[in-house]
């Protein structure tokens, strides 16, 4: 796109009006002249904005009929040769995923656009709107889990964005999903614990994160141990002491390795288990096959492009590998 501050501003205003529901998919937009009056811009600026949104697949123009908001029921076949990754870099797990995605895209001769969203819903929404509005149609999202802006991403799909979610949030039919088979992971951890003196099981999860992956891991724990205790702790705050409910006899299952590391300084000989497989933690863990999952995320986007209108959302779950460092 040719840089033009006025055009960028009008394009963004029109795009946000569509996302807010002022114009819904299939609606006819005002003429260039009428939109120029409404936006207090020149007709030439509006024409450029319309052209850019059309090139991005958000609008389509019909000779003699006008300009309409596009409606995509499937995948968008327009490639663009680039894939955007919306994620944070706040922990080693995220960095490992970024490296794995970058490696896959390099092998496929595709350009990686990295947007850091810091696990913040507002930044996720802002980044996605900006990228799709500029014609980036392929997005891999590692969602925050904190009040994720689901409605915005559903609308972005209809406006032509190919979407794949990794971990945390399992989307509805508007996006593909790649993640760990959490039931299998918990089964592996319970098998290990049974072989090494399983007793008084406790599951430690997050008190300040709403994520499908956390819920699935807790459900898998309860499935195998209905009487087991559930303890919820904040992610960021440091612990001053061992939480009540964890005893020297407890076998401790953690929602992820980061939570296990938080507990480590306060433990004696308790059996400590986690999920992720982060190196250097000294935690018995179910390691996520990051390279295979990154490959699947990229493949899912390419599949959406290839199938176009025939695309239907799919979920792919991977079995982990038990590690004991």
Image: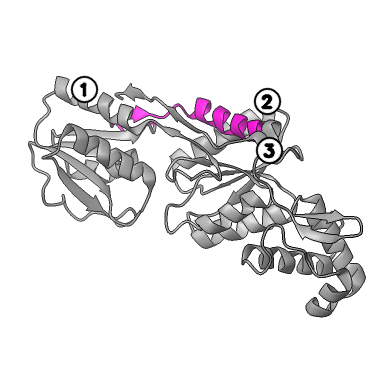
Q: Quadrant of the C terminus?
A: top left
Mark closer to the observer (3, 1): 3
Residue appearing at x 18%, y 32% in the figure: 224
Percent x, y for residue 249?
A: 7, 36
Residue appearing at x 92%, y 68% in the figure: 44
Q: Compared with residue 11, is residue 206 higher up or lower down, i.e. above or below? A: above
* Residue where numbered disc 3 is placed: 309
State which quadrant residue 301 falls in.
top right
> Given the current orientation, which residue lies at the most extreme front position?
65
Determine the secondary structure under disc 2: helix
Say which mark, if any, is on residue 273.
none
Query: Of callouts 3 and 1, which one flags the residue occurring earlier in the amino acid sequence?
Result: 1
Q: Is residue 273 left or right of residue 106?
A: left
Residue appearing at x 63%, y 62% in the figure: 19
Residue 293 lies in the magenta stretch: yes
Highlighted range, magenta:
279-304
* Residue where numbered disc 2 is placed: 107
Tell me, yes or no, if residue 295 can be seen here.
yes
* Residue where numbered disc 1 is placed: 191
Query: Of callouts 1 and 2, which one flags the residue occurring earlier in the amino acid sequence?
Result: 2
Q: Is residue 303 left or right of residue 277?
A: right
Is the residue marked by circle 3 packed among few (<14), some (14-19), or many (20+) residues within 10 Å? some
């Amino acid at each position: 796109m040719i840089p033009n501050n006025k055009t960028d501003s009008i394009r963004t205003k029109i795009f946000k009006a569509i996302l807010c529901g002022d114009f819904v998919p299939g609606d006819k937009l005002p003429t260039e002249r009428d939109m120029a009056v409404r936006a207090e811009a020149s007709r030439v600026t509006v024409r450029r904005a319309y052209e850019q949104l059309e090139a991005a697949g958000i609008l389509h123009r019909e000779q003699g009929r006008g300009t309409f908001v596009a409606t995509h029921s499937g995948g968008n076949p327009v490639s663009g040769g680039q894939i955007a990754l919306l994620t944070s870099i706040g922990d080693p797990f995220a960095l490992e995923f970024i490296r794995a995605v970058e490696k896959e895209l390099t092998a496929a001769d595709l350009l990686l656009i990295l947007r850091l969203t810091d696990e913040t819903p507002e930044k996720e929404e802002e980044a996605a709107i900006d990228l799709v509005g500029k014609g980036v149609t392929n997005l891999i999202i590692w969602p925050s889990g904190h009040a994720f802006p689901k409605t915005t991403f559903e609308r972005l799909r209809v406006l032509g964005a190919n979407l794949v979610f990794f971990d945390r949030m399992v989307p509805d039919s508007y996006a593909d999903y790649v993640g760990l088979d959490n039931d299998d992971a918990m089964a592996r951890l319970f098998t290990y614990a049974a072989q090494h003196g399983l007793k008084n099981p406790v599951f430690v999860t997050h008190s300040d994160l709403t994520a499908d992956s956390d819920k699935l891991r807790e459900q898998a724990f309860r499935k195998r141990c209905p009487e087991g205790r559930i303890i919820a702790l904040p992610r960021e705050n440091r612990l001053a002491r061992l939480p009540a409910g964890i005893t020297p006899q407890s076998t401790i299952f953690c929602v992820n390795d980061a939570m296990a590391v938080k507990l480590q300084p306060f433990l004696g000989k308790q059996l400590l288990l986690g999920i992720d497989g982060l190196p250097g933690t000294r935690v018995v863990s179910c390691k996520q096959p990051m390279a295979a999952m990154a490959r699947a995320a990229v493949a899912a986007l390419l599949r959406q492009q290839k199938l176009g209108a025939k695309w239907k959302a799919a979920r792919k779950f991977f079995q982990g590998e038990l590690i004991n460092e």
